[in-house]
Image (cartoon, rainbow, N blue to C red):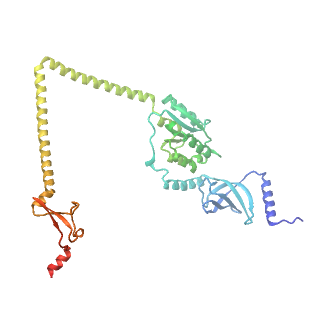
Amino acid sequence: MTVFSVTDFLAHINDVLGKSWNAEELCVEGEVSGFRVSQGQWVNFDLKDDQGLVNIFMTVWQLRVPIEDGIKVRVYGMPRIYPKFGKFSLTASKVELVGEGALKKALAALKAKLEAEGLFDPSRKRELPVFPNCIALIASRESAAYGDFIRIVGERWGGLEIDVYHVKVQGAGAPEDIVKAIQRANTRPDSYDALILTRGGGSLEELMAFNDEQVVRAIHASKIPTLVGIGHERDLSLAELAADVRGSTPTDCARRLVPDRKDVLRDLAFKTDNIESRLQEIIRVKKELLVRALRAPSSWLTVRRQSLDQLTLLCSQNVREWLGTLTDRLNTDIRLLASLDPKGVLNRGYSILRDARGTAVSSVAKLTVGQPVTVVLSDGEGDMKVMDVRRAVQAKQQKLL
């Protein structure tokens, strides 16, 4: 009998478990129970059915769909026993939602989360250019949606430069493909007038790539104005909610992106006719004025002279009013300056006391007994010496005594 240490035994069991599936992932389907996230990075929950239960472990970065207790999911991964705890679990690499009910429930939770973060805020949405020159198109070249979009754009507005980023639009790897394409297009944002993401219709499960959180965040972060159109009408995908402009179908995307050449030409013709009619009317009026002037130049000159006299009179009145306003303002400023003139204060019996350097003395704290000072009066000045220094408080106290 072979005797194992605990560590060797667990390693042997894990090796047997791995070889049982030839190192390939297995898939287990069941209902989520006891979902929890530890330390912001470790995800644990139980997967159960009517007669059994298995523990699931994975990192939070591997969990690409919102889940909660009661939701039915498929878990892809490998079984193992953790040596540290001796606990059997399925180490998951990916989780998929199962059933339309579970999908809708998870989407509602994700939508509420992203909406609270402001990813669908209408105030941040940008307008598309009226006449784009070059666009980035993210789609599957194998889809009918791609063909419809290219055909309609060509029919409506030929000559548009289109850079196609071919991606998977459903199934495993589709969200990663779409995110990478958006990021590649945004490495040269000045090259594109718009970024288009589109595909045809399908079931809710088939359209889940456009409800992936990373895809929605990539659309929100795009420096290029985004236009997203999925070929369904019943429910809006989260990608469409995050886009600057939403098209109901790939065909509608093409119509929203470029104008119809026929409509533009019709509008130009209408505006050209209006300009021509307006110019002809101006020429007719000027011609009539010229004819009347040539027939009766004296009358024409009289009318012009009267108009000139009226303008002259109006200018004279305005100038007189303007000069009056300036005079009043000037007199006000002169009176203000006169009130601030120190000589006016001296004429009222006040004086200015200066020290030996000629600096005005504003406080007895700057005076000492025997200090020479100069007293400036309205009609001259005199030199003196300070005989005594008394502060205002002391003078008041002496007066009271």
308, 246: nearer the viewer: 308
338, 15: nearer the viewer: 338
Q: What is the residue that sits farthest to the bottom in this orientation?
A: 401
In this orientation, does residue 66 appear? yes
Report x, y in % for residue 332: 13, 51
Q: Is residue 85 left or right of residue 316?
A: right
Image quadrant where residue 276 sits:
top left
* Residue at the spot 65% in from the left edge and 62% down from the top edge: 45
Report x, y in % for residue 381: 13, 60
Query: On screen, 179 above or below 307?
Result: below
Q: Is residue 248 left or right of residue 170?
A: left
Q: What is the residue that sits farthest to the right in this orientation?
A: 1
192, 260: nearer the viewer: 192
111, 320: nearer the viewer: 320
The total number of labels drawn is 0
In this orientation, does residue 234 appear? no
Q: Is residue 93 left or right of residue 162?
A: right
Q: Is residue 53 left or right of residue 161?
A: right
For the C terminus, which image quadrant?
bottom left
Query: On screen, 86 above or below 96?
Result: below
Image quadrant where residue 63 sits:
bottom right
Report x, y in % for residue 378: 11, 59
* Residue at the spot 15% in from the left edge and 53% down from the top edge: 337
* Residue at the spot 64% in from the left edge and 60% down from the top edge: 42
Q: What is the residue that sits farthest to the top in this orientation?
A: 295
Image quadrant where residue 349 sits:
bottom left
Query: On screen, 42 above or below 215?
Result: below
Query: On screen, 311 above or below 240?
Result: above
For the N terminus, which image quadrant?
bottom right
